Image (cartoon, rainbow, N blue to C red):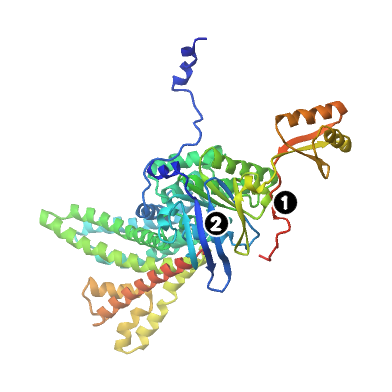
Amino acid sequence: MPADQVRVPERASSVIHDIGYQRYTGPRLGRGYSTASLYVHGLRTAFGLGRSGKSKIFPWAVVGIVTIVAVVVTAIRSQLGRPVLTYLDFAGSVSFLVILFCAAVAPELVSRDLRSGVLPLYFSRPLSRDDYALAKLTALASAAWLLLAGPQTIMLLGGVFSVHGPSAVWHEFLDYLPGIADSAVYATVYSSLSLLVASLASRRAIAAAVIVAVFVVTTPVVGVLGVTGSDTVRQLALLASPSTLVQGLDSWLFHGSTRVIGDYGPVYALVTAGLVVACVAAVLTRYRRAAR
Amino acid sequence: MGARVAYLEPVTLITTQTLTKTYPNGVTALSGLSVDVDPGVIGLVGANGAGKSTLIKIMLGLLPPTSGRVGVLGLDPSTDGEQVRSRVGYMPEHDCLPPDMVAAEFVTHMARISGLPRTAARERASEALRHVGLYEERYRQIGGYSTGMKQRVKLAQALVHDPDLLLLDEPTNGLDPAGRDSMLDLIHRIGTEFGISVVVCSHLLGEVERICDSLIAIDGGRLLRSDRISAMTTATDVLAVEVTEGTDLLAARLAAAGITTTVDGHTLVVPLAGDDTYDIVLGAIADLDLPLHRLDQRRHRVAELFRGEPVHAG
């Protein structure tokens, strides 16, 4: 057989060759890309994307409920011609759902990694321990924020169609911006506290229970202080629970209200900031020691 | 290709100078370890607690040494940890896989964490899983895998970003004899065909000596010996001959032909001088009409070199 006939099958595209091991010559993106990849993975995990159908149930149930709330208030508004729930009130009125969401998602993000022992695989890659912790924190905070900002955006779209004239639309948008900023405050506080608790427990169920407990068990303290205390104690009572703490800050920051917290608005701001900073610092410390 | 150019010149893969690590609780894991290692397949042997894992963590830049210096791929892990870790693959000893993730997704995720762009990560994850022998099964959840398959996924995630150096901590842990053999063959192929240097940690000397070019033996954080296996095996290769009966007859016959043999249990060990040794041995067996049970070439067991070394409680 002539030599050139022998070579014909090799040229045919349908032939599959085992080309053996090939070295990678493409780009190696650094630590920033690593961290961003972990963040995106965390954000997807929060909503059960790329996971089994079972792990999608809870996050999407919560998303469904807050979306229904937004759709219903938008529908009522278009009938009544005036808003029944403002953008600024939205986060506060569904805050318990956000707590449940964080309690379910934070353990998915970090307790699972602790339990499966996957941390050494991350830490033997370009990203650092701090990068890991911050990527997980921002993933949870973004997920919680999206949970609130998504429905608020639905409300905005509904609102834009029920008002008339460009200036009214612009005003609608100006109402919407503080609303999503308020949501960011809720998301930041809830997620940093939840992630800290979850990073200390490798069992997801325990982590979730403790997170809910931190928010719920402290609430009666607020009630007791609010009933029995002097004016000052009553005005500072909301500091006792993380869920009411954000409400207090919210009323001062965005509503300019002194009805409940008196003139202690800056105190609420300081305590909230202190709580977030302390939680983030504790999470970072936790991961500097984990999986040594 | 820039990173590879350095390999055209001989480089020292790993170098340590009086490397010492004392943990805060006072335990000294490494003590004055000085060693230079050339590229290839390297066995890092020592009893449990000898300091192997500590050495690996220092090489990855995850632990700072108490004193002394360390260099990996020409970089200092304590200052250039990020660059070292992007060019090194690590397979830990213990379970480290999320049971609820699909193997292909997990390895792709790990490739991206190593810095590979999305498409490349996906392609190389498939390739890495194929190279470790998991292809059909790669879309199944890791939780349903056998121990052997999990070890392969652990190896695939270490290999996925095409590292210049693989650090494998007890890769045959928990495997049955057949699983051990195929894992060792795979590691040997990675070191030879793939052109990736491999450090294999093991407390089983007999296991790593089969596949390694050089050995580092440590004990109690100190270097026992570090050398190429060829230098450790002082004699040349030997032929191990086993006949069901007539071992003495064969030994006498070979002695008459001028070959000195030694008896090791049921096995007759014949120094392999050249190809004609085979012919002489086979000729002798045929002439004596002996039932040949086994005939294979092997190296002197490196274990013999460590025999009589002081053994510290590790």
- Report the side of B165 relative to B45 (left or right): left
Disc number for residue B304: 1
Place of residue B141 in the rendered image (x, y in percent of width and height, measured from the top left) = 54, 47
Vertical order, A180 against A10 (above or below): below
- The residues tagged by marks 1 and 2 sit, at their Cα atoms, a distance apart of 22 Å
Q: Earlier in the sequence, mark 1 or mark 2?
A: 2
Residue, disc 2: B35
- Report the side of B206 relative to B294 (left or right): left
Q: Residue at x 49, y 50 (%)?
A: B12
Is any atom of residue A282 visible in this view?
yes
Amino acid type, mark 1? Glu
Vertical order, B312 against A21 (above or below): below
Nearest the eye: B210 or B173: B210
Q: How would you rate the neighbour count of disc 1 (Cα within 10 Å): few for under 14, some for 14-19, many for 20 or more?
A: few
The quadrant where residue B230 appears = top right
Q: Residue at x 54, y 43 (%)?
A: B140
Q: Residue at x 37, y 64 (%)?
A: A98
